[in-house]
Amino acid sequence: MAMNTKIIPPPAVIGIMGGGQLGQMLALAARSRGYSIAVLDPGTPCATGPVADYVFTAAYDDLEAAQQLAAISDVLTYEFENIPAPVVAALEAHSYFPQGAQILHISQDRLREKQALEAAGMQTAPYRAVSSGDELRQAAAAVGLPAILKTCQGGYDGKGQHVLNTAADVETLAAGMDTPGRWILEGYVPFSKEMSVIVVRSPADDSQCFPLVANEHRQGILHRTEAGGGWPAGVEEQAQQWARRFAAEHNVVGALAIELFLLADDTIVANEIAPRPHNSGHWTIDGCSISQFEQHIRSLCGLPLAEPVLTQPTVMINLLGQHMECLLAQWAKLPPQAYVHLYGKNEARQGRKMGHINCCGTTLAAAAATADAVETILRMRCCGEEG
């Protein structure tokens, strides 16, 4: 169902809840088109702060601070899904917040998320809700092993998850579940590739999909994304169709990413959603006719969406805290086709996302060769990080 389109031209103020790297890249895309930026984030400093006109330092559940953000903003958005849905709902009642709380509410609970994917006609991994040790035993018997137990709420980049390979693993975990909680047990999916697709939908019910990409994770964190490769017949079309349908059914405005698995028989399985720009879309800054960030801004502001066209095959590599010392020492040795994007975070911790590098080429093989060279220079292929 389409909303009434509200046109918001520059120099309007775009308010962003969340000041991490996604907020920063949204702000940069908006500022390049003449918009002003306000941001709310608990961090001091936050990555978006240096490129914002107004900064509110407060917790995300501080409704008074959120209302102050809304008061000076012509349109509101959030940059990640840990923003409390009740706060968004409260702002939505009196401010222009086209993303809204509905899709945020779904994405904040893995059980609701799986149910929504299934209701939209997508295949998912087998799963069961778990709230106790006994239910875990029953779920493992129904789903089968190996399986992954995940918290229903919270957790990202592999956090809040337990891999269960054997009956002994199940029993050990079940015996320790003394306090009732909410988890979801997901059966293992024997995938051949991890993939993701990003759709951006406008209030006028127009939607545009970015090309389907292949992803590689290391220790639960996205390591590489490859854009520009060929897919088996019908795979990309089905993924994009799923994304468009899900976005329309849930009245999504802005960017929505769906993480997927490709099976050996070329069928696809939906895994998770993210109702905002996504790490696997960072390649679009250098490899696409429009970035996911500008497309998201266009959607929020009621401007026409552009058709995303791959301009050059690109491999995106995440830069983590443990890579920064080597990057700064070896920067001059990086290939000229490697474009470095740093987020300006002040503390380089192990596993913390500090930036990314887009490696481009005339073919995906050439882009991948550049990415391999970057990994070698930055010693990503040693120190236990590979695989």
Image (cartoon, rainbow, N blue to C red):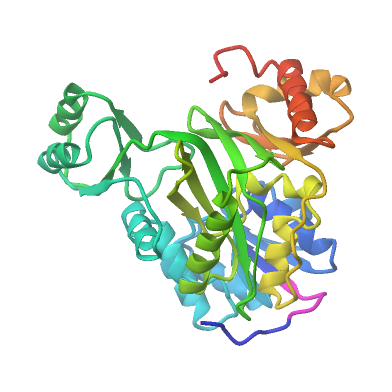
From this viewpoint, which residue is outermost toward the front?
233
Please name whichever residue, 92 or 156, is drawn nearer the observer in this view of the structure.
156
Q: Position of residue 327 (x, y in %)?
A: 76, 23
What is the magenta segment's predominant secondary structure? loop
Q: Is residue 126 visible?
A: yes
Q: Quadrant of residue 134?
A: top left
Please name whichever residue, 356 or 359, is drawn nearer the observer in this view of the structure.
359
Please name whichever residue, 38 or 375, is drawn nearer the observer in this view of the structure.
375
From this viewpoint, which residue is outermost toward the bottom?
4
Q: Which residues are magenta?
A: 8-13
Q: Position of residue 317 (x, y in %)?
A: 68, 33
Q: Is residue 17 visible?
A: no
Q: Quadrant of residue 207?
A: bottom right
Q: Position of residue 273 (x, y in %)?
A: 48, 54
Residue 205 higher or lower than 193, as above or below: below
In the image, taking residue 40 as reference, residue 330 lies left or right, namely right
Residue 57 higher or lower than 64, as above or below: above
Residue 288 within the segment the image draws in magenta: no
Residue 10 within the segment the image draws in magenta: yes
Q: Position of residue 291 (x, y in %)?
A: 75, 55
From this viewpoint, which residue is outermost toward the top?
383
In the image, taking residue 259 as reference, residue 292 lies left or right, namely right
In the image, taking residue 164 as reference, residue 155 lies left or right, namely right
Q: Residue at x 19, y 29 (%)?
A: 170
